[in-house]
Image (spheres, coloured by chain):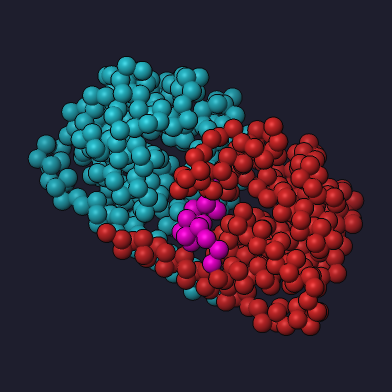
Chain colours: A cyan, B red
Amino acid sequence: MTEQESHVEIPQNHPRRVSLLTRAKLTEGVRQGITSLDGLLAHGRGEAFDYLLGERTRDFAARAIEAAAALFLVAKRPVISVNGNTAVLVPQELAALSEILDSPLEVNLFHASREREVRIHDHLLSHGARQVLLPEREFVLPSLQSNRRFVNGRGIYQSDVIFVPLEDGDRCEALIQSGRKVITIDLNPLSRTARTASITIVDNIVRALPLLVDRAQALASESRSTLDNLLKSYDNGSTLREAEIALREVVHAAGSAP
Amino acid sequence: MTEQESHVEIPQNHPRRVSLLTRAKLTEGVRQGITSLDGLLAHGRGEAFDYLLGERTRDFAARAIEAAAALFLVAKRPVISVNGNTAVLVPQELAALSEILDSPLEVNLFHASREREVRIHDHLLSHGARQVLLPEREFVLPSLQSNRRFVNGRGIYQSDVIFVPLEDGDRCEALIQSGRKVITIDLNPLSRTARTASITIVDNIVRALPLLVDRAQALASESRSTLDNLLKSYDNGSTLREAEIALREVVHAAGSAP
C-alpha cells in the first residue's frame, strides 16, 4: 500500500471525516518512521485551535496566504523547510510549491535522526518532489542550540525567504534574527512562532497548502510591481489581531449556546 | 527502569518542565504499549486548552473536585474507569483513590486490545493498585456501539457513580442515559463530555488527581448530611459557565498583550 492510504475506514459522510483522515495519516506516519510521537502531540494542540476557529479558512488566513505567495515569488532564494508532520500531511502540495517557485524542499527535524531524515526525503520524492535537501554538519545557523541548527549549504543556509510551517518558536526567532524573512503556518495566533514570523497563516495546513499552491500559480505571471504592492498592503499584525478576535468570538458563541 | 522514569532529561528549572515531563510519560507509554497513538493526539488537544486556561487549577475546578469527592463518598458502588492516558499519567493517584473509596479500577479502552488491557492492568498493580478489573464479553452497556460497551460484571455494570476522566462524548452520554452519575475530567469545557457529565472537572489530570485524592481523604470522615449539603450546593452549570468565561478572558488578555 502507498503512504497515502490508511488502515482506517471512515464513512464518506462522517461529519469529522477530514479531521479523522488527517489523524490517520499522522499515526500511519509514525508507523512508517516519518512522524515523531511528539508530532502527534503537536498536531493535537493544533486541532484544538482549529476547532475553536471553526475548522475553516478565515479571511485573515486567505490574505496571509496571498501575501505569502507574493513573498515567495519576489524572493531570490526561497526554501521550504519540511518536518515529519508536513511530510505526511501535504507531500504533493509541497512538491507542487517547490516546482512553481523553483525552490528546494529541505528536511529539518526537531527530533533529528538520519534514518528519519532519509525516510522523509524518500517519501517526498515518491510524491513528486524533485529537489529535496538534507542537513549538512558543515553549515550551522547561529543562535540555535538544537539539531535544527544544521542546514544545507545550497538550501536554508543561503536562503532569503524560508517557509517553516508547524514550527517551534526558537527556530522562528533564530531565522528572523539571521535577517531572513519567515513564512509560517500556525493555528495558535498567540504562539511565539505566530508572533515572530514575517507572515503568519493561521489555518490548518491541510486546507492552507492547496490554497497556497493555487495562489503561487496564479501570481507567478504577475509583474514585480503588482507583487510588491500586494506585500506593501499586507499587515501581519492585523492578521494576528483578527485571528485572536476570531478565537475569542468562537469561544463566546459556543459558551452562550443553550 | 520503572514505568515512571523517562528517557528524556529536562532541566529542573525549565519553565515548561511539568508539561514536557507529562508528554514524555505519554510517549514512553506508547513505547510500552499502554498509551495509544490517538491518546497522544487527544492529549495535545487538552494541552491547548490547558495553555489557554493558564495551566493552573482554577476555582471552578477546585469546587468540582470537592463535589466529586463528596459524590464518590455517598455512592453505593463507585467505579473508576481507566484508559491508556490516565494509566501512565496518574497510576499512583488512581491506586490511592481506589483505596480510599474501596472502589475498583476498571480498564476500558476506546481502541481496545486484550494485550493493551492486560498491560494497563499490570501497570496499575505495579503502582500499588489492588483491585483492577477488565471488561467481560458477557456484560454489555446498552446504547454504545464501540468496544467500550463491554464492561465488568462486578465493576461498571453494577456501578451507580462512575469516574471517567479523559473520556469521549458517546460514552459519557450512554452512561448518563443508563441512570448512572458521571464524574469527568476534561480540559475543554465546550466538549460533549464536559456538558453531559454530572460533575465536570475542567483541569489537567496531573494537577486534579492529587487534589481529588486529598479531598476524598479529608471528606471521608464527614457525616452523610455534610456530604449531601455539599452536593446540594454544587452547580455543574456554573462550573461550565465560569470555565468558558475563563477561556475567553485568557484569549482576550493574550490578544491585547503588546
Relative placement, left or right, of A53 versus B258 is right
Please report the residue visible at 33 percent of the width from the left and 61 percent of the height from the top: B255
Please report the residue visible at 45 percent of the width from the left and 22 percent of the height from the top: A117
Residue placed farthest to the front in the image?
B12
What's the magenta region?
B44-58
Relative placement, left or right, of A79 versus B3 is left
User: Which of the 4 image quarters holds residue A140?
Assistant: top left
Residue A236 drawn at (x, y percent): 24, 51
Residue B51 inside the magenta-drawn segment: yes
User: Which of the 4 image quarters holds residue B119?
Assistant: top right
The image shows residue A220, relative to residue B99, as above or below, that is above
Residue A232 drawn at (x, y percent): 14, 47
Which sits in the foreground, A12 or A63?
A63
Which sits in the foreground, A21 or A51?
A51
Residue B50 drawn at (x, y percent): 51, 57
Which sits in the foreground, B181 or B249?
B249
Quadrant containing the N terminus of chain A in the rendered view: top right
Please report the residue visible at 37 percent of the width from the left and 21 percent of the height from the top: A135
Q: Is there any visible trace of residue B20 in the rendered image?
A: yes
Please report the residue visible at 62 percent of the width from the left and 45 percent of the height from the top: B39
Residue B240 drawn at (x, y percent): 56, 71
